Amino acid sequence: MKSVISALLLAAVSQAAPAPSSKTTTEIGSNPILFDGRIPPLFRSALLDNDTTSPYNAEYVLGLEPWSKVVHFPNVDHSLFDVPLGGKPIIVSINDKSIFQTQTGFRRSELLPDVNSGNDVTTNGVTAHHFSIRTDNTRPLNYSHEYQPVFIETQDYSSHVWQLKTGTPFGESWTEEAATTLRIYSSSTSSDALEIFNVPFTTDDWHNFALEEDWTNNLLTLYYSTGQSPLAVVAGPMANDNSGKGQFHVGMLKLPTGPNGIDVTKEGYQEKRPNEGLTYGGVFIEDTSSGSVTLEPAV
């Protein structure tokens, strides 16, 4: 199942030309910022449709609609690392038009950093990928499905360096309580992915994550907090196969339901006229080779 899902996720992404560097960087902490995906307060959704004005890839990973139709800006509190910028939270949504190329089994809308080609400054040395996530109560998820809201997919599209998941794993039957959790999984490159952390996906709370990857020594450290609390280590450092490097995905990847053995990229059940979304904030990647991850924004 791992190879079926992963190998076909982004075969076409490599054809996209690299875009300019991020446009939004302000001071976050003392470490160099390799990518700043936070949304400035006056940013308009139409700016995501053009590589010259977007910190993200304007073309991938999308269905039939442009980013300006897919994203929304909710009236909710700033996430932890959006505070210095006055940054806007961003909702990434899916609907029945969210079919990427021929992947009719999936529903997908995923933001990709413009600087992240798969083997670049964000996947060498020691780096930390930051993001905050919260529910969108106007576009609730169907937790009988598996969702992959954030992950790094290896540059050969065959596996993952790590994944955040919520919902019911494909082919399994879980209670709603068990499914309504945020779960971090380790690399699936050289062995089966292992769950290394889970927490209830509580409504209207910001869940803040940072995953630090030592790309040379194949180590992973996980940081987590809620609301405006500073990040703290909750797992690691631990051995993790980071050798595949890869691309950072932030958004909605919804798997179908159906029996084991089907091609989940093209088969399975998806509801008609879905209107689902998740809220993101504080997305950035920092160089942590100095030995420390930024736990809270600079004052």
Image (cartoon, rainbow, N blue to C red):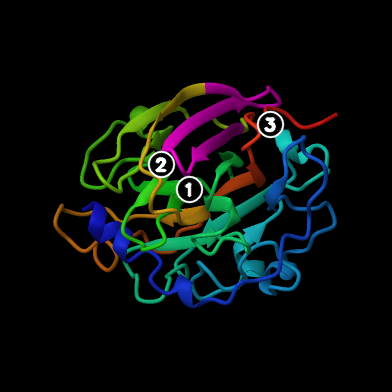
Asked if residue 298 lies left or right of residue 188, the reply is right
Query: x, y percentage for residue 25?
Result: 79, 51
Check the image and report above or below for 68 versus 277. below
Helix, strand, or loop for circle 1? strand
Task: Pick the residue in front: 159 or 225.
Answer: 159
Residue shown at 21% from the left, 53% from the top = 1
Asked if residue 176 lies left or right of residue 3, the reply is right
> Is mark 1 in CB contact (under 8 Å) with mark 2?
yes
Residue 1 disc label: none
Q: Main secondary structure of the magenta part?
A: strand
Q: Is residue 173 magenta?
A: no
Task: Pick the residue in front: 113 or 142.
Answer: 113
Q: Which residues are magenta?
A: 207-233
Check the image and report above or below for 151 versus 45. above
Task: Pick the residue in front: 247 or 266.
Answer: 247
Query: x, y percentage for residue 169?
Result: 29, 42
Q: Amino acid at mark 3?
A: Thr
Which-is-in-front pick, marks 3 and 2? 3
Q: Earlier in the sequence, mark 1 or mark 3?
A: 1
Quarter where residue 21 is shown: bottom right
Q: Amino acid at mark 2?
A: Lys
Residue 149 disc label: 1
Task: Pick the residue in front: 146 or 143.
Answer: 146
Distance in Å between CA atoms under marks 1 and 2: 6 Å
Residue 165 disc label: 2
Residue 294 disc label: 3
Distance in Å between CA atoms under marks 3 and 2: 24 Å
Which-is-in-front pick, marks 1 and 3? 3
